Image: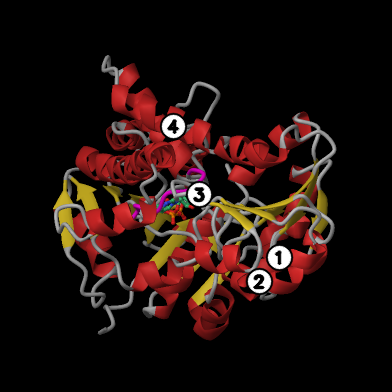
Amino acid sequence: MSTPQPQKVGIVGAGWVGLVTGACLAELGHDVVIRDVDETRVAALSSGEIPIYEPGLEACVRAVGSNLRFTGDLAELVEEPRVLLVCVGTPAMYSGDADMTAVHQVVAELAAAGVPEGTVIAMKSTVPVGTGSAIRKELDERGLKHVGYASNPEFLAEGTALKDFKNPDRVVVGGDDDEAIDRVVALYDGLGAPLVRTDVASAEMIKLASNAFLATRISFVNEIANVCDATGADVTEVARGMGLDKRLGPHFLKAGIGFGGSCFPKDVSALKQLAGNSGYHFQLLNAVIEVNELQKRRVIGKLTKHLGSLRGKVVTLLGLTFKPDTDDMREASSLVLASRLIAEGADVRGWDPVAVEQARALLPGVDLFEDAVAALEGVDAAVIVTEWSHIGDIPFAEVQKTMRTPLIVDGRNLLDPAELRGLGFTYEGIGRPSA
Ligand code: UDX
């Protein structure tokens, strides 16, 4: 990895994307200032506290020293020309459309602050197709014709974000101004990534379509798993066989209890709405969303198959975050499962290696544990919700003796069914044959 020519970068938004991007760009040698409206967050970051859990991020921020600074004042980002990366949230609204309030707020603030010649605004936030051309118009109307604009979507996954940044499958930059595109492309020089240089609308669509397609693969393999459940095939074998076809590939074919997180659910529904608002009914995405909703509930049927009524039964959820190696609980399957189980009359316990604190507010009525062995003592069933590697360290031979009913419902097909059955457990996976 060679290093790019250092540039001055400003990042708007010290959320997960802004922090990871800022730290990695600073590590590449760029001079980075990150601005956030939350002064408490800025103060914490300035004193070296990292408010999110992302492997390697804290060490990276520490290592880059003065290449990375934090501020609450947008004026600092426009004191001199910088590439300004917009990394603010675009959460889903009730309609399913992306809420663009924060993005437009940034444009208005930049216009008010006065932006010097040579500034380029690059949009990293995931936005509906058409946003870039609307922002270009807004910039021109607000007297910022001299400011370049580009779309530069991010493809970082939580838990592997630093690795994803340093080894990207591709860098996508869309724009209609060659100089602006060149400045953004140059930020990533030396990473050796294939470059997709394109127009703004296509860059915006690449991000939405990529996430929607990955989510489609997951819902597809989840439906295959459900058919496996009904027919006796094993979905882990099926996915292995499918994945060896080079046209399919092995990734995102892990069946389980559905996708969650801050991106897939939001981006799939944003693309569906975008299509609908443009007069096209995106039927496939409706199915992807519906399959994902139903998939989270498959666990209930597997529990009742063995326990009958769940009233008064004690069930432990192992893993509460939407996936391992993050403390993020947005759209996590645990949220739906816990409230469904409580509605069925079960007593619900929850264990997670990093997110017990976050879970307190989000899972009212759930008894939370930091120790998995204690969380499983005396219970009727353990449900694997998140495939944390820590679950492999649980002494299942001991736990089998302390559970009231040794039933494991493995919502992520993480464990070896033969091994657990050998220890005396009843094991149910998703799309794996019952013993
Ligand atoms: C995703 C994209 O991968 C990333 O490129 C994008 O920029 C942001 O959205 P992230 O949400 O962090 O990243 O997680 P990811 O690893 O993609 O997993 C998303 C969800 O799908 C998780 O709930 C995960 O458990 C689930 N999943 C993933 C499956 O159920 N099966 C799989 O095979 C893969």
Q: Look at the image and tell me in which quarter the N terminus lies.
A: bottom left
Name the element at disc 4: helix
**Does the Cβ of the disc 1 residue fall within 8 Å of ligand 1?**
no
Q: CA distance from mark 4 to mark 2?
A: 44 Å
Q: CA distance from mark 1 to mark 4?
A: 43 Å
- Whether residues under marks 3 and 1 lie with C-beta atoms below 8 angstroms apart, the answer is no
State the residue at coordinates (44%, 41%): 229
Q: CA distance from mark 3 to mark 2?
A: 54 Å
Residue 304 as seen in the image, left or right of residue 205: right
Which percent across, then down, holds residue 97?
45, 27
Residue 127, how many percent across, how many down?
38, 38
Position of residue 88 measured from the top left corner of the image (x, y, whole percent): 50, 47
Q: CA distance from mark 3 to mark 1?
A: 54 Å
Q: CA distance from mark 2 to mark 1?
A: 5 Å
The mark nearer the N terminus, 3 or 4, is 4
The residue stretch that appears in magenta: 252-258
Q: Which mark is residue 434?
A: 3
Q: In whole angstroms, how far apart are the C-alphas of marks 3 and 4?
A: 22 Å
Going by the image, does 93 lie left or right of 41? left
Which is nearer the eye, 228 or 211?
228
Residue at point 34% right, 18% down? 277
Residue named by callout 4: 291
Name the element at disc 2.
Answer: helix
Image position of 367 with respect to 400: above or below: above
In percent of width and height, residue 317 lies at 69, 52
Kind of residue at badge 3: Ser
Q: Amino acid at mark 2?
A: Ser
Question: In front here: 122 or 114?
Answer: 122
Q: Nearer the viewer, mark 3 or mark 2?
A: 3
Amino acid tagged 4: Val
Please tell me which of labels 3 and 1 falls first in the chain: 1
Which disc number belongs to residue 43? 1
